[in-house]
Amino acid sequence: MASSLPSVHNEWLNLFSHVSSLLHVPPSHTSELPDLDARTTARLIDHTLLAPAATLDQISTLCVEAREHHFRTVCVRSNHVAQAKKDLLGTDVGVASVVGFPSDDDYPSYTTARKVAEARSAIADGATELDMVLNYDALKEDGQVSENDQTSMYTAIYEDVMAVREAAPKPTLLKVILETSQLTDEDVARACVICCLSGADFVKTSTGFRGHGATLEVVQLMRAVCDVCQSEGLTTGRVQVKASGGIRTIDDVRKMVSVGAERIGASAGVAIISGLNRRNSGIPKALEDRVRGDYHISEANQRLQSTVTESSQPGSPYSPANGQNAV
Ligand SMILES: O=C[C@H](O)COP(=O)(O)O
């Protein structure tokens, strides 16, 4: 692994070119979506409440829901980890803490020291998983760095993730949020390579606070890049993909799983499971749609479907091979 780590800017660029030359994003899923039962679906979901103004009562309600449905984790801000841990003692639900997360309308770039301190505090309070935000703004500085520069922002981005990884060694799971709505496909791919080299367990699409959430294309691209990194020996194991942001229905989940997501971050976890149960119990679709409407399903579907059609650059190595979109 150490010999694979670039040290200067143009070594990073060479590595990115090498990975992209091997990249084959498969055709988008066009046929059957996977059947998922309620238990399997729940174990895919990080049941999420990240509103900065969330109260302890709301966190406790989140935990009651997570216990009832057996979600994989609750995903909360670090100041809520201790409460969630207490509420979930003796259950099969983990606690995931975000690190370096934005607030409603502020997207600060946290220092590495601050992320490390937040990670340590969350783990001390009982977090079993961390969802840290990548320093994704730095990815956009590529044009300002010459290929001969000895320093590279890619090294700085890598070191930021590594510092949190070292503060949160396995078995704590480390997910790195790319905030894909803010990135080009090329930058998404580069971010995935950096995360793979840093020993992340997951790459995750979105915070849900900035721009649109997960799209099928970006999940598919992230899966493909992580596969290339693994086959090229750039990872210590399989790096998984977490889709988050705007996932509201069981069909949204099925679509994301069909293109490679192995974890779902959603604040609509209860609605997703309830919709699935109603469907399985044969409640007429018209009634289901009316109930689901309470959760702004049609708006979420529109968001998902419109982002699905924002295709990657045709002909680029980051585009699906046949350009078809999943629906
Ligand atoms: O990390 C997860 C996201 O914040 C969830 O976003 P969402 O509220 O659109 O489900």
Image (cartoon, rainbow, N blue to C red):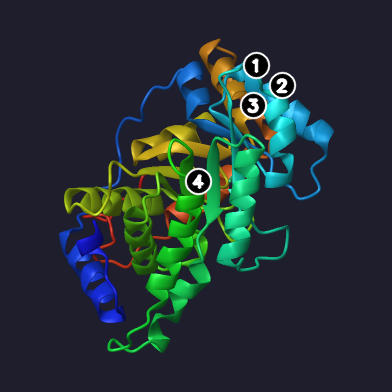
Separation of residues labelled 4 and 3 (CA atoms): 29 Å
Q: Is residue 101 left or right of residue 171?
A: right
- Label 1 sits on what residue type? Glu
The amino acid type found where label 2 is placed reads Val
Question: Which numbered disc, 3 or 2, marks the residue closer to the eye?
Answer: 2
* Relative vertical location of residue 70 with respect to residue 191 in this rendering, above or below: above
Which is nearer the N-term, disc 1 or disc 4? 1
Residue marked by disc 3: 270
Asked whether disc 1 touches disc 4, contact meaning CB atoms under 8 Å apart, the reply is no
Name the mark on residue 294. none
Give the image location of residue 94, x and y in percent.
57, 29
Name the residue located 35 percent from the left edge and 36 percent from the top edge: 258
Residue 47, x across and y down, in percent:
61, 33
Disc 3 residue type (three-letter): Val
Alpha carbon distance from label 3 to label 2: 11 Å
Q: Which residue is mark 4?
A: 168
Residue that carries the numbered disc 2 in the rendered image: 64
Disc 1 residue crowd, few under 14, some 14–19, many 20+, Cα 10 Å: few
Count the numbered circles shown: 4
Label 4 sits on what residue type? Ala
- Figure check: 191 above or below 12: above
Give the Cα distance between marks 3 and 1.
10 Å
First reached walking from the N terminus: tag 3 or tag 2: 2
Residue under circle 1? Answer: 68
